[in-house]
Image: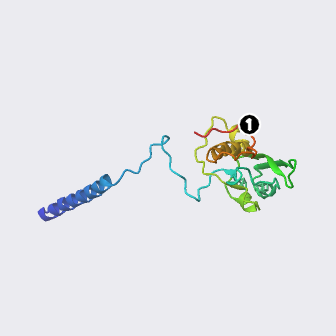
């Protein structure tokens, strides 16, 4: 190797080092974007697909589902089981049971598209955990809606005098944990 070639190689190495240092310094001075999970979490983007869930009507805190079973029939993986009943004084059915087998759900969205009432949606839940696979084979969406309804109820003004309070929600057992 001639002396000139050796100097050129040293020069190229030095410039490469400077480039690396410039990029490192640029990143070092930028604001920290890491999140201290699980103490901190990020909101999921609008198009994120967590498991499906019953939509909570923001006006009433109830489900919009009429147990018509269209989603159950639309699901290619047969992972939805819906049941409903006509409650006293109601013209349409209300959902009484909505079970999801999340172990076979492909998150295809066919059920959501089939629903004429926008009564189901993709949740933003990304961290469902359990030690048992069985917890995901029968996810109770009615129970989950009841839990969300309790949170929703805390954001509502107290009922006016003479207005009937919303019925109490009694969560059922057997659902995966969400930390
Ligand atoms: S997202 Fe697809 S696979 Fe999952 S429950 Fe709905 S229709 Fe079935
Ligand atoms: S979620 Fe929609 S499609 Fe499925 S049973 Fe309820 S109303 Fe019918």
Question: Residue farthest to the left?
Answer: 3
Q: Position of residue 145 (x, y in %)?
A: 70, 46
In front of the other: 24 or 168: 168
Q: Is residue 98 visible?
A: yes
Quadrant housing the N terminus: bottom left
Q: Is residue 138 above or below residue 122?
A: above
Q: Position of residue 153 (x, y in %)?
A: 66, 45
The image quadrant of residue 30 is bottom left
Horizontally, residue 22 falls left or right of residue 10, namely: right
Q: Residue at x 74, y 36 (%)?
A: 172
Horizontally, residue 139 falls left or right of residue 4, namely: right
Q: Residue at x 61, y 43 (%)?
A: 128
Residue at the disc numbered 1: 172
Q: Is residue 165 above or below residue 8?
A: above
Q: Position of residue 124 (x, y in %)?
A: 60, 51
Q: Quadrant of ligand 1?
A: bottom right
Horizontally, residue 97 falls left or right of residue 30, namely: right
């Amino acid at each position: 190797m001639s002396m000139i070639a050796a100097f050129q190689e040293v020069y190229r190495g030095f410039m490469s080092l400077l480039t690396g240092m410039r990029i490192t310094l640029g990143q070092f001075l930028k604001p920290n974007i890491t999140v201290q999970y699980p103490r901190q979490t990020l909101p999921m983007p609008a198009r994120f697909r967590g498991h499906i869930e019953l939509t909570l009507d923001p006006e009433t805190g109830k489900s919009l589902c009429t147990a018509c079973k269209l989603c159950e029939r639309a699901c290619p993986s047969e992972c939805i089981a819906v049941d409903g009943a006509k409650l006293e004084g109601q013209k349409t059915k209300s959902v009484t049971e909505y079970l999801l087998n999340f172990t076979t759900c492909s998150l295809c969205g066919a059920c959501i598209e089939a629903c004429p009432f926008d009564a189901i949606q993709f949740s933003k839940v990304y961290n469902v955990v359990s030690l048992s696979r069985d917890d995901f084979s029968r996810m109770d969406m009615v129970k989950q809606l009841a839990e969300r309804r309790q949170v929703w109820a805390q954001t509502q003004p107290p009922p006016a005098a003479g207005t009937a309070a919303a019925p109490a929600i009694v969560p059922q057992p057997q659902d995966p944990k969400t930390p």
